[in-house]
Image (cartoon, rainbow, N blue to C red):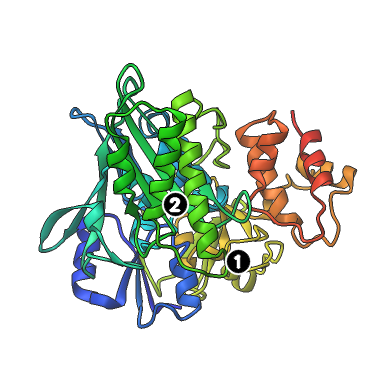
Amino acid sequence: MWHEYITVESINETLKILSTKGVGARIVAGATDLILELERGARKNIHTLIDVTRIANLDIILLDEDNIIHLGPLVTHNHCAGSALIREQAYPLFRAAWEVGAPQIRNRGTIAGNLITASPANDTITPLMALSASVTLQSTRGTRTVALKDFYTGVRKTVMQADEMLVDIFFPALNPKSQRGTFLKVALRRAQAISIVNAAVILTLEADTTVRSASITLGAVFPTIIHATEAETYLAGKKLTEDVINEAANLAMQASKPIDDIRASASYRREMVRVCILRGLKNLLNGQEQAWAPSEPILLWGKHSKTDPVSHQSPSPIETKINGEKIVFNTGHEKTLLRLLREEGNLIGTKEGCAEGECGACTVFLDGKAVMSCLVPAGRAHGAEITTIEGLSNGESLHPVQESFIKHGAVQCGYCTPGFLMSAAKLLEENSNPTEYEIEQAITGNLCRCTGYYKIVQAVKDARQ
């Protein structure tokens, strides 16, 4: 899918390569969209991937002295879901990040990548637009700052140039004393689903719940994320009564200009905009916007996540450690990690179900985190520590979750079982006594086509310490 894979250790190194390689090069962080686009031929003439995931300190979330929150370009959705700062002072982003995909996807997909992909249905663009976020773009020519509202020029189109790297995302932190916000999403299922409609609502309130200002943004109803400006203007200076909330929801609906597509009709989308804004405003009025949020989100990170700085360039051998054993691959550089493991490594326990990050059958641990190996470039394995289903047991002693699957007969055709076992084992490493809800959250990225979920959940319950 690519001819050259370069792992870099600095932003400057990245920018030099971009300036030399031009439009044929792409930066890789999560690669959860890019790999699919390359496989499907949607991205043509891409010959070089630049892996920036080994650059130190780019996955940091911080609050500066001016009360501005900064997200580094390697901050993932799970970084945001696990951040107390984001939850307390940028809740709409927390909720949007938590609603993206499943744990394995959230462990790889970055907020920066979500912004750059520029789909109007991408979940994190909507809250960041409502938060008045900006991005910093850097190249060998210099640095520039672009407000997110000016970043998009159309569907999957931005103002970024081929030689630029997004190096910072920043926005004012919400004031917990006077500002409340939320994010709402309508999709065809509760996880692993693209938005039919999404919306972010942020209110600045007086002590008597009079609205000082409002920010309402809508996704998947226009070629770009849009503000419901008439609804925002209408709310300013008004108390949140039932009539005011209903009118604001109607005005937001009128701002939307959706299309019919395979996921929903335009009329349904318009009505769901109204419903989302109605529910969002009512939740904010009642202080219930965070009532549903998990106190300890399941991340599938475990206790030993780490990433070491590495410099590497294909076709140099990929030197990695798999299941505790050092392995060198001289071929397979142009493949995904899944196919490297199966075809070059002969580790066929990891399965290919969908090859697009939907089913979780290919789940492995990469530097301590559960990921979909079908969406990881093979080059990322260099200098990494990987655990596959073959390494889950300790010699002849099965992992407790493997024993519990046998005990409860939590297997039908068995094809999905390796992925479920990997997710369950990482969950128990992260939380030795999870609730049933937490177990369900941990396996949202895993599909069992035989519908054996009841026994799978029971097996994980029984494996708890």
Residue placed at 72% from the left, 56% from the top? 418
250 relative position to 297: left or right = left
Q: Nearer the viewer, residue 314 or 269?
A: 269
Residue placed at 67% from the left, 54% from the top? 446
Q: Position of residue 105 (x, y in %)?
A: 53, 53
Counting the numbered discs, the total is 2
Choose the circle earlier in sequence order: 1 or 2: 2
Query: Could you tell me the amino acid type at mark 2?
Result: Asp
Q: Position of residue 426 (x, y in %)?
A: 63, 42
Give the quarter of the image for residue 455: top right
Q: Is residue 231 above or below residue 13?
A: above
Kindly identify which numbered label has been placed on residue 341: 1
Is the C terminus in the top left, top right, bottom left or bottom right quadrant?
Answer: top right
Q: Is residue 11 above or below residue 162?
A: above
Q: Which residue is mark 2?
A: 123
The crowd level at tag 1 (other Cα within 10 Å; few <14, some 14-19, many 20+) is: many
Q: Is residue 365 above or below residue 338?
A: above
